[in-house]
Amino acid sequence: MTPRRRVIAAVGATAVLIAAVLVLRQADDTPERPSSEPVRLTRYTTDFITLPSQSAAPEPPSTVWSSDGRVHWTPVPGVSGYEVNGRLVASPEVAASGRPDVRAVDGFGQRSLPVRAEERPGDDGWRRAVNGWLDDFDDTFLERRYHLSGRRGCVNPGSGSGGRLVIDMPCGNDAAVLRARTLLQLNDADELGRVVVVTDAAGPHGKLVLDLVPGTPDRLGPVPPADAVRVVVDDSVSPGTRGAGVLHRFEVVLTRGGVRVLQDGAQIATSPVVPQWREASVLIGVTPPPSFPGRVEIDAVGITGPLQPMPEVIETPIVAGTLRVLEPDEEAPGIGVARAPLRGAPSARLRATVRIGDGGDPNGLVAQLGSARLPLRPVVSGWSAAEGSELTVTGDVPAELLGSAGPDALSCLLRPCVLGSLRCWRATWRCRGSRR
């Protein structure tokens, strides 16, 4: 290459370099977008997805009223929930009183115009229909009026506001069963009898089970005896809009034409079953929502029939020496409980609830207290022998175990009779000692 051409090439390369520097400087001089400035995104995601469009604010509830410790309103179609004085709820009711404002809330969080609740008088007519025993839980000594069945430490009764019974179940997946010591006694009128329970147990994911059964069982399990009347109220039972923690009144009315179930005076279920017995125990089973911890409130219980003297009963739980049924000749473990509750008792009775395996036979079941053996008998008839059934049995404590004489401690065991076999009995059982 000649010197002239070299000079021209060098000048050209210098010009290209200067132009590149100018371009870079122009890019660097462009002002950057501040990081605090919001970035607006489009609603487009992809061709096969249609995003919802935000509509106008939802319509307010058409009717809102307050009565009997709860605020209730007509559901609004298409909304996600409701706001009551700043509190968001999913069901169209909430435990409250007075005249709060209620708004409907849609999926975008938009609120409707507020609607103020109208106060309506409470319904106390059901109290006059209960012409027998009515418990408002003013007496905090629960044992005088009920037997409470549940896992120790996982079912804890207490008192709440307004004299309500509060049952805390902190272990999860537990149920409590109250057996009223007052029996339901039928009369000869067209309405044979009535049981009333005011509770929040049938709220979202909770369950209320009312069993009317001859005898005095502590629990019945999933399969009740053939002559029992069982009522179950949960999310599957209409209207199914019961709010969390909201008290409702449930009534089981026995008539000559069948059984009627009422919620707050409105009929929610019927059955043509007419009981053939004249008196029965009332078992109230409550199950909280599957959460940790669970909590159920009971405000009142009413049972029709003539007033009856309340039995004088003192219950003492007994720690069993084993949680299974022993064979007749099997060696007993050396675990005992104090005999102190029996020292001052004129008489005593042992009660146990056993969970039966498929095909189990309770005939010949014997409880062993120390060296004494107590024949046990079922407290109900017509019980089911299906897997998971529960049966309460009882037996009289012999006189030699009462009073000041006798050993300081006793072991509590369960055995079959020598001629029988209970290899199919399974799971846990509860043993109760009580003065009569």
Image: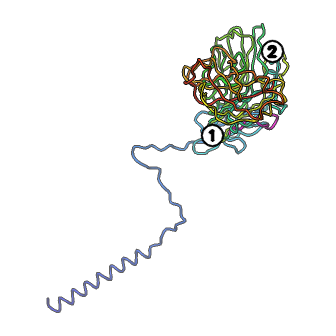
Considering the numbered disc 1 on the image, is that residue within a helix, a strand or a loop? loop
The residue identified by callout 2 is 305
Which stretch did the figure color magenta? Answer: 157-169
In the image, 311 versus 105, the foreground residue is: 311
* Quadrant for the C terminus in the image: top right
Residue 294: x %, y % from top left: 67, 38
Residue 121 position (above or below residue 190): below
User: Is 260 on the left-hand or right-hand side of 142?
Assistant: left
User: What is the spatial separation of the Cα atoms under label 1 and label 2, in whole angstroms?
Assistant: 38 Å
Amino acid of disc 1? Ser
Residue at the limit of the structure toward the bottom, as seen here = 3
Is 142 located above or below residue 398 in the figure?
below
Is 278 a magenta residue?
Answer: no
**To which residue does mark 1 refer?**
291
Q: Secondary structure at mark 2?
A: loop
Tally of marks: 2
Res 158 quadrant in image: top right
Q: Nearer the viewer, residue 300 or 431?
A: 431
